[in-house]
Structure formats: C-alpha cells, structure tokens
Image: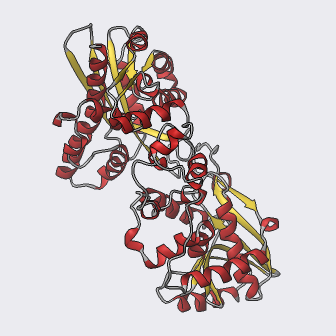
Amino acid sequence: MNLSKSRYTLGIRCKKLLWLSCFKKAEAEDLGNESVLENGNKVGDLARGLFGNYTLINYDDNYKNMIDETKKELLNKPNIICEASFSYDGNFCSVDILKNDLDGVEIYEVKSSTELKDIYKDDVAYQTWVLKKLGYNVKKSFVVYVNRNYVKNGELDISKYFIKEDVTDKIDLDKVENEIKSLKKIINSKDEPNIDLSLGCHKPYDCPFFKYCTKNLKEPNIFNIGWNVQIKKKLEMYYKGIITYKDILDAGGLNEKANEQMRFELYDLPPKINKEKIEKFLSQISYPLYFLDFESYQESIPTIDGTKPYQQLCFQYSLHYYLKEDGELHHKEYLSDDYNGNPMYGLCKQLCDDIPMNSCVLVYNKKFEISRLKEMASLFPEFREHLLNIADNIVDLLVPFQNQDYYVKEMAGSASIKKVLPALFPNDPSLDYHNLEQVHKGDEASNAYLSLKNLPKEEELKLRDNMLKYCGLDTYAMVKIYKKIKKL
C-alpha cells in the first residue's frame, strides 16, 4: 500500500489512526464534517486564481494519467499548474497550486481554515520532500489560508482574502523521510498498532475512531466528564489508571462542577436546587418578557458587503413572549425568503417591530445572540440603536444551569439546552426534537436555508414550515424551562 499526503498527515497525528483509516473504515464515527469538506472545495477553487491564469490537472482514478499530464504541463514554464501530481517510490501527492518558474517551482497548499496549524506544515513538508526527491528545485513552500479579518466591500479581493505564509524554513526533510519509512511499515502490516490515546485524539481535529479506541473502558469514565475539563487533564489521569468516576473522586476529584457531575451519576443523587440563587436570577426578569432564538449560517467566502469569512449570518428567529406576568403566551417568527441577497436586513426590520425598546429579552447562551445583534447593528445604522437596546436588555437562561444552581444527573455534565430540556421534561413528546421532521438541530437548519432556493415550490414550502417548527421549539423550550424554575 502506498502513501498520499492525506495518509501522511493522518499518520503524523497518530499511526493507529492511519492504520484504522486503511483497514477498519467501518469503525469510524460520522463527525458531520460535510460542511468542512464543502468549504474546503470552495476555498480551494477560489485560490486557483491567485496568480492569474492556470492549468488544472483533472482528477483521474488512474494517478499515472495525472502524473503524465503534469509532466507535459511542466514543460510550458513559466506557468501555474493546479493539482500538479507527482509520485516518488510509492509516495503520491497533488499540489494545490504549483508556481512553475524558469528556475524552479513554488508549492502552495491551500486550506479553508483561518489559522496556520502545525499539521498544514507537515502536509507541505511531505509535498516538498516528494518533489525534491524527483529532482525539482523547490524554491519555496507556502501554506495559503483565509484571512479572518478580511471584510468584503464590493468585488471580492482574493489577494486580501487569502494569507500566503512562507513555511520553507520550517521544513525538516530528514524528519519527513524517517516518518515515511515508519508509516510505510504501518500501512503494510496486517496487525493493528498498539498505540494508546493521546492529544491527537482531539487535536487538531476530533478523531472519528475515538469511540472505537475507548470501547473497552468501563462507562462512565474520565472521557464522559463535561464542564470544560481539558483533554490534557483527562489524559493525565487516564495514564495514571484513574479512569472511573470512583477512581477520580477517590484521587481527589477535578473541579467542583465536574465532581458534582460524578457524584450525581455515581450515587444517583436527587436534583440539586439552590432556590436562593435561582430567586436572585429571576429578580432580573421583567415584563413584557420575550424569548428569542436566532438561526444562522456561515459563508467561507463572504458574498454580503460588510461581512467577514465564516461570520454567522442570521436568517431566522423565533419569538415567544408574555405581555404581562401570568398572561397569555404569544408567538411571532421570521424566516427570510431573500435567498440571494442579505437575509439580515428584513430580519432586523421585523425584529425591531416585534420587540419594543427596553423590553426584557430571555435567550439561552447570550454570547451568541448579543454578538449577532452587535454585528447586525454595525451593518444597518437605521436599526443600530434598537438592536443594541435589545442586546443591552438580554438575560441569559443558561446561567442557573451553567452555575449548577439547578442540576440533575441526566444533564451529564452539560448545561446546553439540548441536555437540560430532556433532563427536566423526560416524557414530554412536544419537547422532543426527534419528533420534528427534516430539521432537528442547528446545522440542519443552516443547511436547509441554503438549499431552499434550489427546491421546487412545494418542497420549499414544506421545508420552510419544518424550519419554523424547529426554531419555534427552541423558544418554546425556553418558555417551559423558565416556567419550571419560576415554580420553585
């Protein structure tokens, strides 16, 4: 079996990950990375124009055809070749952008990320090694990634959208050669490597084989603990054999919240309710009271003026509200139909009509909603004062659960609404997201919105209706949680 640059970078992270990806693909967990792959393709296609006209080597299952086509194009120097393909001693790579100059070549590896990660340098180092072994004069090697601070105004300027970082001096070719020899042994062995868990299980990405590699650990264990206990700390305890909740507590525990989680699950403790702190939280709330939730999507390549790469763009909201305490529950909602323009303008206009100034607004995890309101306020000066007023009057329903003022064992170390809701209302089908049709979570809502413009009218209307039901359940869930803690 041969190496490729993708296999090489898997092996750099973890040799067992490489072996499993070759021989036990069925054990991999679906981590929902489709949008990451889609963004990677979009950004990669855009980057091809960085140096003007280029020649593209089309993908072929027979790599030899790609290699032969590359050899022909290399003769036409100077030129730009995208997906230029090479192989040396069973080590294959396609270079995203190859700048083929009269006196040598430059390698440009394109990433859709907004930061330079070490694994990207490993990727480029492998390509550099292959080309140098083939006798090419590799003058420089670069990682090309997205400038997170780029703001679109008018036509997209790809020279400012991308950052080109020279990593030539950070490449150790001897290290690459030694790694290749080691990885070749791994992928040509029928025996699964005996390699323990490491930071590579979650950094720089979550490993799809983590459940497979921990399948023999008794549950619950150190890796089931929430409350922001870092993977480094979990691994430290795991290496010492401190794995079960009892082991951890006997060894002195972790932080206060994590200890609570373990005690509640280990000893099946009854709900913890700090009425004094909950009462203090509720004292912030006044009427009329609005329950607000946004849905948003991201664009790797911004199409709307005034926005940045990967900025959250709101297209929908749900709003349940009481005009007075113990009054009737009302509901309003908005879902943009401006599929090709700016969905946020219409949303802001209606939101300012729906929420009066100086009204108390309840959200779940205020950081998200406040950030969106401030971003939209900067985009639309006519709504600025009103949007910032809404932001200033937000109360976060997350707080009592984040502080463990209300905690039950079923929350399993999380204060997210998707954990809190079923924990507080375990047998209420009207609050079960699984009973919804088509849209059950945030990323599905985002993908649904982006697909609406391409659907036949009947399918569009059906999907819109299910999107409204999903977002409506988010705010109705907040209403139910609020009423639950208010009864205390």
Give the residue drawn at x 45%, y 15%.
Answer: 393
Which residue lies at the image location 40% right of the left edge and 54% below the top edge? Answer: 218
Does 305 appear above or below 293? below
Q: In this view, does 252 lie above or below 399?
A: below
Query: Which residue is at a point 63% across and 69% down the rendered structure image?
Result: 12
At which x and y percent is residue 483? 27, 18
The quarter of the rendered structure image containing the C terminus is top left
- Vertical side of 354 occupied by 207: above or below: below
290 or 337, nearer to the observer: 290
Q: Does any portion of residue 471 appear in the rendered image? A: yes
Please give left or right for residue 184 compared with residue 137 in the image.
Answer: left
- Residue drawn where x is 37% and y is 38% of the image: 265
Q: Can residue 99 be seen in this view?
A: no
292 or 254: nearer the viewer: 254
| Residue 212 sits above or below residue 402 on the image | below
Colour pattern? secondary structure
Residue 261: x percent and y percent?
43, 35
